[in-house]
Image: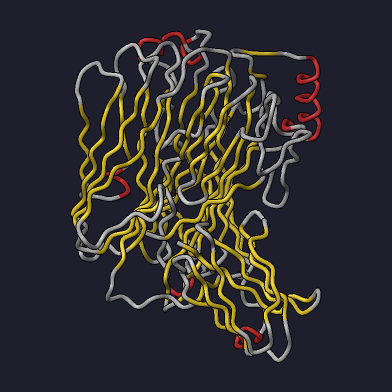
Amino acid sequence: MRIYRLFMRQLFLMGIFFGCGLFLNASHLLTGDITYQCIGNDNYVVTVTLYRDCSGMSAPTSVMLNASSSSCASTFVHTMMPDGAPVEVSQVCPSQYSSTTCSGGSLMGYTKIIYSDTIQLPAQCDDWVLSYSQCCRNPAITNLQNPASSDLYMEVLLNNSNGICNNSVNYSSIPIHQTCVGSGVSYNHGTYDIDGDSLVFSAIPSKGNATSDIVYAAGLSVSDPIQGTTTFNDIGYNGVCGTYDFVLNAVQLSIVTMKVDEWRCVNGMQTLVGSSIRDLCLIGESCTNYSPSVWGVSKGLNLYGYGSDSANYYAQAGDSISLNTYFWDTDSSGNTTITSNHNESMPGSFVSYAPSGNDPKKWAYFSWNIPSNAKGHYLLTFKGEDDNCPVRAYTYHSLFIHVEDSNAASCTQVVSIQDFLSNSESFFKVYPNPSKGVLIVESSYSKDLELRVSDLLGRKVLEKVLLANGEHKIDFDGRKGLFMVEFFNGNKLVSKYKVLNE
């Protein structure tokens, strides 16, 4: 393997290109993901989806899925075969499919290959990790240092302890996005969860294996991961819906990695039941086609529903809700098409589109008669695409619909496999959790402590002294997502909590 990687690095230094400016590499895999479905008795249908650049070698004939649990000291490998032939999913208009590299042409082409099988986990553990890796990443990646020396790596966390039968998140969007330099774009993975779990998104470093992050190119970081003539406004990340907003200022092939955690109320406590990481392959090209614009969301609800901001929408179980949005493409030659993941995310919901025919502006009308047992969190994503050739332009808009139940008991504490530090937690009360904007922290500890609140990227939200036997209110000031609340006695961490602010 070491000799092979040295060979690949030599190809990179020699500047050998194949197809659309991309380098030859071992697998020609651009990105991928792992999902799973619980079918009971610790059995899961696991799916590995790979996206392959057509300018190189064939897709793997099989994948080796690794499963491991540290707490249960268990590990095994399961071989998975492809479900069928690769399917082309290139970002071109239909008339240009014969001109992609998948058909011997020059336009960038890529295919999707699905591998799936049923596995049975031998024990109930809260830290099962299912992973897959493949040598090697594409040397043409511009925002990572020495990408050809690292594998393409993907993983999911699975918690089947205490009889939890969780389904992973799924994705409705292809994780490859081609766009013109200078075009403003919103991208969303189209994440949805059929269990209605609360989803928390975070940006993380791209990984070469389970324990190693890949170093970014000089001047780039997790919060600023793409290249351009300026980097201040290159990319903005919405941790509520997992939406990337960006303007590429330079031709590039960049990898941006997202992690999504699934939280569920289990026995009165918010518990981490699963997580997933997924790479976005972002391709900036020299072209003139600009993505459609999204013109907001207008809402119609009964008395019980409300929207707290542009990303969150609240309703009660049993309500009837409706909303609409539209996409407009100023340089379209005629037709803008809208699609959504509403059928997968919220079965029984309805979306209609208007007007029909060749019109660059299209409305999407969404409605849902929420079932009385549908308490949970549902992520709705719309995709707008133009009809320009040869490469179509996309943009996305997402909204998190939170369905509440006034009769259900609330969760009192967020816990996970990392949270049990010591018995000192009995000295603190942190509530309500999830919070609706303001969090109460009570301490019966005998000493003054330092209270620190930070987001998942480690950015400080609040730092203040918590007096012995004192109380403090934390105002999140409109920030949404998962936060760490930590108590320090000098440099010693006394206790910590994960708090979900909705």
Q: Is residue 500 above or below residue 289?
A: below
Question: Looking at the picture, how far across and down is residue 160, in whole percent?
Answer: 47, 67
**Picture residue at 28% right of the left edge, 73% below the top:** 406
Residue 43: % across, % down: 41, 60
Labels in figure, total: 0
**Residue 73 sits in which quadrant?**
bottom right
Find residue 1 and report its image quarter: top right
The residue closer to the viewer here, 438 or 17, is: 438
Position of residue 229 relative to residue 402, above or below, is above
On screen, residue 467 versus residue 113, left or right, reads: right
**Structure colour scheme:** secondary structure
277 versus 96 height, above or below: below
- Residue 59 point in image, percent of width and height: 54, 28
Quarter containing the C terminus: bottom left
| Residue located at (43% from left, 51% from top) | 169
Q: Nearer the viewer, residue 306 or 273?
A: 306
Left or right: 285 as drawn, with respect to 43: right
Q: Is residue 346 above or below residue 219?
A: below
Residue 98 visible in the shown view: yes
Front residue of this view, candidates 110 and 298 = 298
Q: Is residue 90 visible?
A: no
Residue 275 pos. (x, y %): 52, 56
What residue do we see at 30% from left, 19% from top? Answer: 360
Write the residue at 31% across / 22% down: 336
